[in-house]
């Protein structure tokens, strides 16, 4: 008589137990994961703004020319729009501050932020553009409040020196 082959695989009972454990773990971790994803989205969007302003400041100082960051939903023209709808960073060669004209050099375009992110400009950021002078400075300080749908908030501060910083505030939007 031949010996029976060794069993391989899982029994139905073992499979159902494993699925039950996975379901419980997902039920516990799911809300925390959603909060993590939302916080990551907010941080990334806020940092995108800081990077655009830092690029403009650095390029203005390096080139010795005015560099402007403006709101732009199409990435090709400046528009009187919201900061979350996209941005255009360009060397403002023609001297018309805040207008992207022929002869201006595009340094960077940034697409719109995630739809769950909203921005509220404060101070000089209320205009649809911020322009850095040839020394990398702003005429007036600006703040942009960045909020997510779950009421988390970050504040991008652009100082008169041109430095952009990111503050995490526990206050709801």
Image: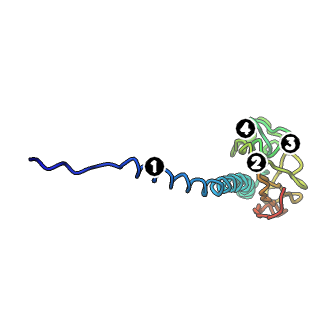
Instruction: State how far apart marks 4 and 3 are (Cα).
Output: 18 Å
* Along the line of sight, the residue nearer the viewer: 84 or 152: 152
Snapshot quadrant of residue 166 = bottom right
Q: Quadrant of the C terminus?
A: bottom right
Report helix, strand or loop for mark 3.
loop
Residue marked by disc 4: 75
Between label 3 and label 1, give the one nearer the viewer: 1
What is the crowding at mark 4: few (fewer than 14 residues within 10 Å), some, or many (at least 20)?
many
The correct choice, above or below, for 168 with respect to 127 in the image is below
The first of marks 2 and 1 along the sequence is 1
* Along the line of sight, the residue nearer the viewer: 97 or 31: 31
Instruction: State how far apart marks 2 and 3 are (Cα).
Output: 31 Å
Kindly check if marks 4 and 2 are in contact, taking CB atoms under 8 A apart as contact. no
What is the crowding at mark 1: few (fewer than 14 residues within 10 Å), some, or many (at least 20)?
few
> Relative to residue 17, is residue 61 drawn left or right?
right
How many numbered marks, from 0 up?
4
Residue marked by disc 3: 96
Residue marked by disc 1: 16
The first of marks 4 and 1 along the sequence is 1
Residue at position x 75%, y 40% in the image: 104
Q: Position of residue 57 (x, y in %)?
A: 75, 57
Colour style of the rendered protein structure: rainbow
Report helix, strand or loop for mark 2.
strand
Kindly check if marks 3 and 1 are in contact, taking CB atoms under 8 A apart as contact. no
What is the crowding at mark 3: few (fewer than 14 residues within 10 Å), some, or many (at least 20)?
few
Residue marked by disc 2: 117
Between label 2 and label 1, give the one nearer the viewer: 1
């Amino acid at each position: 008589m031949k010996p029976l082959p060794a069993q391989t695989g899982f029994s139905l009972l073992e499979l159902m137990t494993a699925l039950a454990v996975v379901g419980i773990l997902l039920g516990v971790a799911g809300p925390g994961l959603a909060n993590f994803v939302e916080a990551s989205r907010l941080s990334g969007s806020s940092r995108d703004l800081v990077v655009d302003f830092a690029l403009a400041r650095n390029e203005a100082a390096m080139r010795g020319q005015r560099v402007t960051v403006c709101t732009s939903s199409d990435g090709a023209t400046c528009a009187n729009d919201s900061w979350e709808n996209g941005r255009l960073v360009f060397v403002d060669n023609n001297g018309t501050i805040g207008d992207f004209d022929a002869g201006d050099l595009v340094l960077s375009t940034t697409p719109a932020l995630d739809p769950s992110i909203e921005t509220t400009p404060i101070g000089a950021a209320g205009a649809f553009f911020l322009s850095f002078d040839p020394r990398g400075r702003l005429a007036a300080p600006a703040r942009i409040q960045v909020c997510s749908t779950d009421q988390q908030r970050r504040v991008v501060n652009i100082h008169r020196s041109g430095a952009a910083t990111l503050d995490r505030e526990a206050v709801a939007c």
